[in-house]
Image: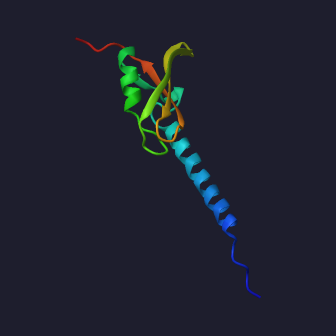
Amino acid sequence: MSTRPKRPRAHQREKRRELTKLVDKLDRLVHESAGGSPERAVEVSSASVIEVKARAHRCGRCEGELLLVAHEAEFRNGVQLRRVDLQCRSCFAPRRAWFRLGPPPAN
């Protein structure tokens, strides 16, 4: 007795599950990278460079350009952090980047 071939819809569901797993893995990698969480905040010397550095990041899913949505200051454990919310222009995936204000550079 031979097995029946899979229906086209079953193939589509299988591919969609694989794609979802890949996207979840990429999102975890972005979260674990520098600036992906408050614990891994990127240190900057001034608040004026945060938006420039945030726009320099690329989308973790499609490598597309990111659009700045919000830039807000937060305090966590007595440390001032900057949270930057971004959105991909291509796939519309949200991304959050974290920055920590460090001491100003010496002259």
Which image quarter is the C terminus in? top left
Q: Residue at x 36, y 15 (%)?
A: 48
Question: For this view, does 107 lie left or right of residue 17?
Answer: left
Depth check: give the residue in front, 7 or 27.
7
4, above or below 87, in the image: below
Q: Residue furthest bottom?
A: 1
Residue 76: percent from left, percent from top: 56, 17
Which image quarter is the N terminus in? bottom right
Residue 101: percent from left, percent from top: 42, 16
58, above or below 13, in the image: above
Indicate the colouring scheme.
rainbow
Image quarter of residue 58: top left
11, above or below 58, in the image: below
Q: How many marks?
A: 0
Residue 24: percent from left, percent from top: 59, 46
Residue 7: percent from left, percent from top: 70, 70
Q: Residue at x 46, y 39 (%)?
A: 59
Q: Residue furthest right?
A: 1
Q: Residue furthest left?
A: 107
Question: For this view, does 17 lie left or right of residue 93?
Answer: right
